[in-house]
């Protein structure tokens, strides 16, 4: 049986990307033990990760079971982390569970406001590991169970996160401009969920990296 990747070539448009300083991080989503989104080429998870590791230095992994059920697929995440440095969002609720995410081999544990119980728990997580990214989940305002997080301005929330010690903040496209202003004043690493077509605009906002599912635009069938 032929390898499905025999006819697939990853193309990194160097002339375009070199003119922009920001990092591109492809995003994959796990639903159960399977990949949910198919913007990337068909094939086994191992094959896809191997191809991505040739072109990118980091992967963003979102674990639906972890986020929605508090049952992250740690063994699948471990297999992925073995193939490429990974930012892993596994639905962390309590600070002590950050270790569960990091023992997969993930380089960074992503903590989203939609699952985090409180900022106090974020502080507990940071005491256990500094390898944490704070993610602002957004739906007509920042989403959280914690009233000290929900609905707040990204500037104020970023300041509180920085006081904990976390200096990597990830936001959706809707918050990019406000987060950029906060970054310039407070000083932190800023990532934005966006498409590749948004890249020039985010470069002007001095965003440090994009997390995108749109990396299929860097793939062509020959």
Image (spheres, grey):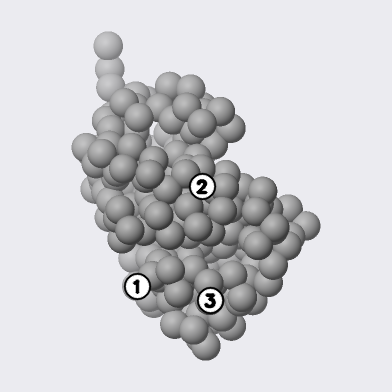
Residue 213 badge? 2
In the rendering, at what x and y percent does residue 27 appear?
A: 45, 46
Does 214 appear above or below 147? above
Q: Residue at x 38, y 75 (%)?
A: 21
Outermost residue toward the right in this view: 140
Mark 3 or 2: in front is: 3
* SS state under label 1: loop
Q: Quadrant of the C terminus?
A: top left
Please tell me whether residue 40 is drawn above or below residue 109 in the rendered image. above
Q: Quadrant of the N terminus?
A: top left
Name the mark nearer the viewer: 1 or 2.
2
Task: Answer whether residue 211 is visible to the viewer in this image.
Answer: no
Disc 3 designates what residue? Answer: 159
Determine the residue positioned at 44% across, 30% down: 72
Give the crowd class for mark 3: few <14, some 14-19, many >=20 residues within 10 Å: some
Say which of 217 and 25 sits in front: 25
Nearer mark to the viewer, of 1 and 3: 3
- Residue on which disc 1 sits: 18
3D distance between C-alphas at marks 3 and 2: 28 Å
Farthest top residue in view: 1
From what the image shows, is residue 155 above or below residue 31?
Answer: below
Query: Which of the two discs, 3 and 2, labels the residue nearer the N terminus?
Result: 3
Specify which label sits upstream in the sequence, 1 or 2.
1
Report how far apart the C-alphas of labels 1 and 2 lie in the structure: 20 Å
Q: Which image quadrant for residue 194?
A: bottom right
Residue 81 in the image, given as x and y percentages of width and height: 27, 39
Given residues 124 and 191, the one toward you in this image is 124
Q: Is residue 186 left or right of residue 147?
A: left
Q: Which quadrant of the view contains residue 7?
A: top left
CB atoms of marks 1 and 3 within 8 Å: no
The reply to whether dot 1 and dot 2 touch (C-beta < 8 Å) is no
């Amino acid at each position: 049986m032929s390898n499905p990747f025999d006819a697939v070539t990853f193309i990194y448009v160097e002339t375009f990307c070199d003119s922009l300083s920001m990092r591109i991080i492809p995003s994959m989503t796990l639903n159960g033990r399977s990949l949910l989104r198919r913007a990337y080429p068909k094939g086994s998870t191992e094959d896809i990760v191997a191809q991505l590791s040739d072109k990118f230095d980091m992967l963003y992994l979102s674990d639906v079971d972890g986020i929605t059920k508090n049952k992250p697929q740690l063994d699948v995440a471990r297999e992925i982390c073995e193939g490429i440095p990974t930012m892993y969002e596994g639905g962390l609720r309590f600070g002590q569970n950050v270790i569960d995410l990091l023992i997969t081999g993930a380089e960074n544990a992503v903590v989203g406001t939609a699952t985090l119980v409180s900022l106090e728990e974020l502080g507990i997580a940071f005491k256990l590991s500094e390898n944490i990214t704070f993610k602002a989940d957004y739906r007509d305002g920042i989403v959280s169970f914690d009233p000290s997080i929900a609905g707040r301005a990204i500037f104020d929330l970023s300041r509180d996160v920085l006081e904990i010690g976390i200096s990597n903040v990830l936001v959706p496209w809707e918050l990019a401009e406000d987060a950029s202003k906060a970054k310039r004043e407070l000083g932190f690493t800023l990532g934005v969920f966006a498409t590749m077509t948004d890249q020039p605009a985010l470069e002007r906002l001095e965003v440090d990296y994009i997390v995108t599912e749109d990396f299929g635009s860097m793939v062509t069938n020959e």
